[in-house]
Amino acid sequence: MSRVFAIANQKGGVGKTTTAINLAASLAVNDIKVLVIDSDPQGNATSGLGVSKDPDKPSLYHVLLGDTHAKDAIRGTDFEGLQIITADKNLVGSNLELIDLNRREYRLRDRIAEIRDDYQFIVIDCPPALDLLTLNALLAADSVLVPIQCEFFALEGVSELMDTIDRIREAFQHPLEIEGILLTMYDDRTNLTRQVAADLREFFKDEVFRTVIPRSIRLAEAPSFGKPILTYDPRSKGAESYIQLAKEVLRHEQTRKSAQSPR
Ligand code: ATP
Ligand code: MG
């Protein structure tokens, strides 16, 4: 059984890619096979994992819009157990190109069906938009993980995303779960951060991960070396926080499994 996460928030710069890379690595370090799918034309997850954006190599674009099989677009990373389907600027036009395709919203889901069971987790990094790429990711996913930066408009942005998720559940009859809301770039020295965090926890209750990701220079530096924080600075607070997040995700998985298994 595999589980597919979409890391989504239409707001830019909230820590989606940082979370996709570092959650994926923190899961993979447990001897678990993990695939990252970079579904953002910016290709930040690709370069952040040290993989080249070579437009001639098969990438997500070729899988979504061409005849390339997902398994032929998988590339290795330097991090053991972690593989990636890359994104590059080819993907920029994909929102327009997808429009004319059959089952355009299900394209990603259909195309990764053949590789799903090769992985325990698949982590999809979404672009900062509620566009067709994000819709494809949400329909391919079992659950969505929403990184939020604790700032004044955070609650409004996440409410809009939650409404969208509700509409997707209804319109597509897709039982998308909320894996969790993740507070990122957390700096508890500021009153605003603490107040926004308290409001989010009051409003979304247990849907907010207990783990928070601190604001950390080391986390911001790691992608420029093409490394997850676990290799760049394994003893840092940032590394520790993503390991905690992976533990929480694995606990969710355990709870789901025991709920499913016959007594
Ligand atoms: P986009 O919407 O453009 O895809 P994103 O939501 O994927 O952005 P990231 O790219 O992960 O966000 O992060 C935005 C910026 O903030 C990056 O420069 C990243 O290195 C930095 N950053 C992310 N998380 C942290 C953190 N916990 N502490 C400090 N800097 C961070
Ligand atoms: Mg990003």
Image: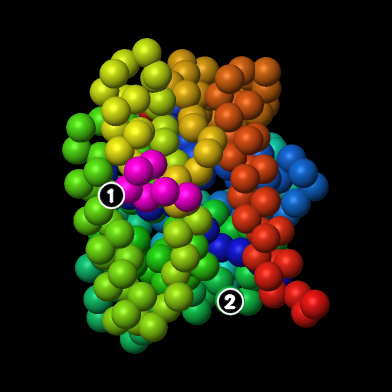
- List the residue tagged with mark 2: 113
Q: Is residue 149 visible?
A: no
In which image quadrant can residue 186 be found?
top left
Residue 36 magenta-highlighted: no
Q: Is mark 2 within 8 Å of ligand 2?
A: no
Q: Is residue 244 above or below residue 165?
A: above
Q: Which mark is residue 158?
A: 1
Amino acid of disc 1 = Val
Measuring from the top left, give residue 24's x and y in whole percent: 60, 45
In which image quadrant can residue 262 be found?
bottom right
Q: CA distance from mark 2 to mark 1?
A: 29 Å
Amino acid of disc 2 = Ala
Q: Is mark 1 within 8 Å of ligand 1?
A: no
Q: Is residue 148 visible?
A: yes
Task: Locate the C terminus and report the quarter of the image it occupies.
Answer: bottom right
Residue at x-position 71% and y-position 58%: 254
- Locate residue 196 relative to residue 67 in the image: left or right: left
Q: Secondary structure at mark 1?
A: helix
Mark 2 / mark 1, whichever is N-terminal: 2
Residue 203 magenta-highlighted: yes
The picture quadrant for ligand 1 comes to top left
Q: Nearer the viewer, residue 5 or 55?
A: 5
Residue range highlighted in magenta: 201-206
Residue at x-position 25% and y-position 81%: 100
Q: Secondary structure at mark 2?
A: loop
In which image quadrant can residue 121 be found?
bottom right
Comparing marks 2 and 1, which lies closer to the viewer?
1
Main SS of residues in magenta: helix
